Amino acid sequence: MKKAILATKVGMTQVFSEDGVLIPVTVLQAGPCVVTQIKTEDNDGYNAVQVGFVDKKDKIINKDKSGKKDVIHRHGVNKALKGHFDKAGVSSKRFIREFRFENAGEYELAQEIKADIFEVGDKIDATAISKGKGFQGTIKRLGQHRGPMAHGSKFHRHQGSNGACSSPSRVYKGKGMPGHMGSKKVTVQNLEVVRVDAENNLLLIKGAVPGPRKSLVTIKETVKTLV
């Protein structure tokens, strides 16, 4: 892997290609990210680049009226992380991720990584936390069939038989059951970059990208190319 970037999902729209074909795209606010740490094989056992994304305020510690107790504003970066960012010479960041670049030695601390590292036609992998849909039944969660919808069937959206009665007298491991749906790490591979807006740090990706709007998306060059 030689290039990657962090982004937030803006939403979906559609654009026309040069030959007039309508293409559904996902708009991503990609970067700018800054390099917060460079890991080397000598110090850390492997080569990687740590990047930060989206500015975040530092924690503010004040004294209460008595002057004895510290009051901490918790919606900020703690002291340890603040020291880490100060060492790199960058402002505090909300998201920190690490990429194992083959060319990690070419990067420098506080260097910016912008959307223009990708070009139109590049193939990428997008990773994000999928939308959470709460507790769902097997029809929605697993795509199972429903029962007859007649009034007397009494079997409409039940999942059906769970297992045999006397043998083996248990439910097999892996049986599809109702449960929590979504909120899982999902990677969609081999997506195509349709447009790159370097001025506004926007990437237009063909098709759907996992996650709700405003969620964090990790964009990497694809690990495999489909022919």
Image (cartoon, grey):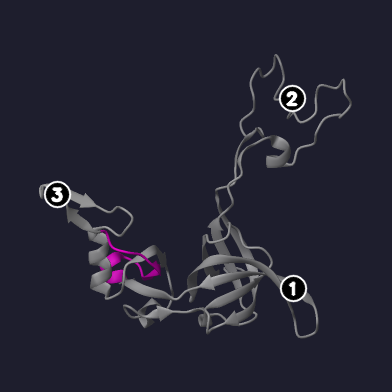
What whole-number distance in Å separates the C-alpha atoms at marks 1 and 2?
43 Å
Residue marked by disc 2: 161
> Looking at the rendered structure, which numbered label has been put on residue 23?
1
Q: Amino acid at mark 1?
A: Ile
Task: Tell me if I can see residue 108 in this picture.
Answer: yes
Q: Determine contact: label 3, label 2, CB under 8 Å.
A: no
Q: Say if mark 1 contacts mark 2, CB within 8 Å.
A: no
Relative horizontal placement of residue 214, taking residue 97 as reference (left or right): right
What kind of element bears circle 1?
Answer: strand
Residue 184 x/y as whole percent: 55, 49
Disc 2 crowd rating (10 Å Cα; few below 14, some 14-19, many 20+) is: few
Front in this rendered view, residue 58 or 2: 58
Residue 149 sits in quarter:
top right
Nearer the observer: mark 1 or 2; the answer is 1
**Residue 55 figure quarter:** bottom left
Q: Amino acid at mark 2?
A: Ser
Res 65 label: 3
**52 drawn magenta:** yes
On screen, residue 196 versus residue 206, left or right, reads: left
As rendered, which of 178 and 198 lies closer to the eye?
198
- Marks 1, 3: nearer the viewer: 3
| Mark closer to the chain start, 1 or 2 | 1
Magenta-colored span: 41-59
Q: How far apart, in angstroms, are the residues tagged by discs 1 and 3?
A: 60 Å
| Residue sticking out furthest to the top | 166
Quadrant in the picture for residue 42? bottom left
Q: Foreground residue, 40 or 204? A: 204
In the image, taking residue 79 as reference, residue 4 lies left or right, namely right
Task: Pick out the residue farthest to the right.
Answer: 150
Q: Earlier in the sequence, mark 1 or mark 3?
A: 1
